[in-house]
């Protein structure tokens, strides 16, 4: 059967092919923007790791303080070392893990979109949420490093078990991890602390993704440039970091062909800036992404002012096409 012109165009220049061209540094037809062009469909599993109000599957208690953000943690299951002896990680139910993924597959046309798994927070966030804050985690890592090792290994095992269940059933193109490791101008911890506690465990997570043939995506707030060479060596393909905290132009130059940056339109600008400021940031993303290596998106998954989101959309439609 002779395919229609529409089908042929979809095959030749689909959002899926275009974003792959950007990720592989093959000069995309336009600046990919999953929010606007549908180039990525994201599905999450059924393990509840965060709620706006209530208790998640790790037994952390949340409440909604800001309607423009999301739940805020107010209760933690491991206040003392004795609590650790009584704590059990979430039990993993195959059916529960898979249910939202299998239900959502019909909403993603894989001829048009890459399929991404949102695998939730990384190790750092999950452990400080268990023990009651970053400061306490840092203190315990000094006083009781074996305890912190135990907690982090427990989180890794849960995440690997969930990932194994999912990847046995569904062939994902991207697996998305999160891990907020930076402040405005530097890391939250020393590189040595990251190498001691986080790097070897994230290597296990990334290795499982790469062995499944998927792209590895990592989100982090703040300035994490110091870690990028090691992250690339560990297998990170796509890095979602804030452009206001990290030198995107330098990173793209130094890791050309090896790393794609995702984001580029500041959450701060979308939240508090003007439409004209949003347009400036879209223009900068368009220039940075001409040869590939850039996927444009809001800097964070929050709720933003409608006029600023509309300004982002119009600027992208007007200026984001390369060929």
Image: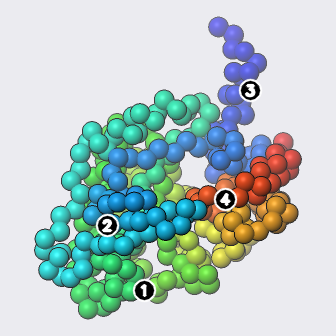
Disc 4 versus disc 2: distance between alpha carbons?
A: 27 Å
The disc label shown at residue 60, or none: 2
Report x, y in % for residue 321.
Answer: 82, 45
How is this picture coloured? Answer: rainbow
Can residue 200 be seen here? The reply is no
Q: Are the residues at dot 4 and dot 2 in contact (C-beta closer than 8 Å)?
A: no
Q: Are the residues at dot 4 and dot 1 in contact (C-beta closer than 8 Å)?
A: no
Position of residue 45 in the picture relative to residue 186 (left or right):
left
Report x, y in % for residue 83.
Answer: 17, 76
Report x, y in % for residue 42.
Answer: 52, 45
Identify the residue position indicated by label 3 in the image: 9
- Viewer-nearest of discs 4 and 3: 4
- Viewer-nearest of discs 4 and 1: 4
Mark 2, residues whose alpha carbon is within 10 Å: few (<14), some, or many (≥20)? many
Identify the residue position indicated by label 1 in the image: 192
Q: Are the residues at dot 1 and dot 3 in contact (C-beta closer than 8 Å)?
A: no
Report x, y in % for residue 67.
Answer: 55, 62
Closer to the N terminus: mark 4 or mark 1?
1
Rendered image quadrant of residue 301 = bottom right
Closer to the N terminus: mark 3 or mark 2?
3
**Residue at the (77%, 55%) spot, across then down:** 307
Disc 1 versus disc 2: distance between alpha carbons?
A: 29 Å
Position of residue 269 in the picture relative to residue 240 (left or right):
right
Disc 4 versus disc 3: distance between alpha carbons?
A: 34 Å
Closer to the N terminus: mark 1 or mark 3?
3
Work out whether residue 59 or residue 179 is closer to the camera in this orientation and state it: 59
Can residue 268 be seen here? The reply is yes
**Residue at the (13%, 71%) spot, across then down:** 86
Q: Secondary structure at mark 1?
A: helix
Mark 1, residues whose alpha carbon is within 10 Å: few (<14), some, or many (≥20)? few
Identify the residue position indicated by label 4 in the image: 304
- Viewer-nearest of discs 1 and 2: 2
């Amino acid at each position: 059967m002779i395919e229609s012109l529409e089908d042929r165009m979809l095959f030749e220049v689909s959002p899926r092919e275009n974003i792959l061209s950007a990720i592989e540094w093959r000069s995309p037809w336009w600046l990919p923007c999953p929010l606007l062009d549908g180039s990525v469909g994201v599905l999450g599993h059924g393990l509840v790791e965060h709620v706006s109000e209530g208790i998640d599957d790790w037994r952390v208690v949340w409440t909604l303080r800001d309607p423009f953000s999301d739940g805020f943690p107010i209760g933690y299951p491991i206040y003392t070392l004795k609590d650790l002896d009584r704590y059990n990680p979430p039990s993993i139910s195959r059916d529960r893990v898979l249910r939202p993924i299998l239900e959502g597959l019909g909403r993603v046309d894989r001829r048009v979109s890459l399929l991404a798994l949102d695998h939730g927070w990384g190790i750092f966030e999950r452990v400080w949420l268990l023990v009651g804050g970053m400061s306490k985690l840092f203190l315990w890592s000094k006083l009781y490093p074996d305890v912190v090792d135990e907690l982090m290994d427990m989180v890794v095992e849960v995440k690997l078990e969930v990932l194994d269940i999912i990847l046995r059933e569904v062939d994902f193109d991207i697996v998305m991890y999160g891990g907020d490791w930076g402040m405005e101008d530097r890391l939250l911890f020393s590189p040595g602390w990251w190498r001691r506690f986080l790097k070897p465990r994230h290597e296990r997570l990334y290795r499982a993704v790469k062995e499944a043939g998927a792209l590895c995506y990592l989100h982090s707030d703040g300035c994490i440039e110091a870690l990028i060479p090691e992250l690339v060596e560990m297998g990170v393909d796509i890095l979602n970091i804030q452009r206001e905290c990290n030198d995107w132009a330098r990173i793209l130059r130094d890791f050309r062909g090896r790393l794609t940056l995702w984001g580029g339109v500041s959450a701060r600008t979308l939240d508090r800036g003007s439409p004209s400021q949003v347009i400036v940031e879209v223009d900068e993303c368009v220039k940075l992404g001409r040869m590939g290596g850039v996927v444009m998106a809001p800097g964070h998954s929050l709720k933003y002012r409608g006029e600023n989101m509309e300004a982002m959309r119009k600027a992208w439609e007007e200026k984001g096409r390369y060929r």
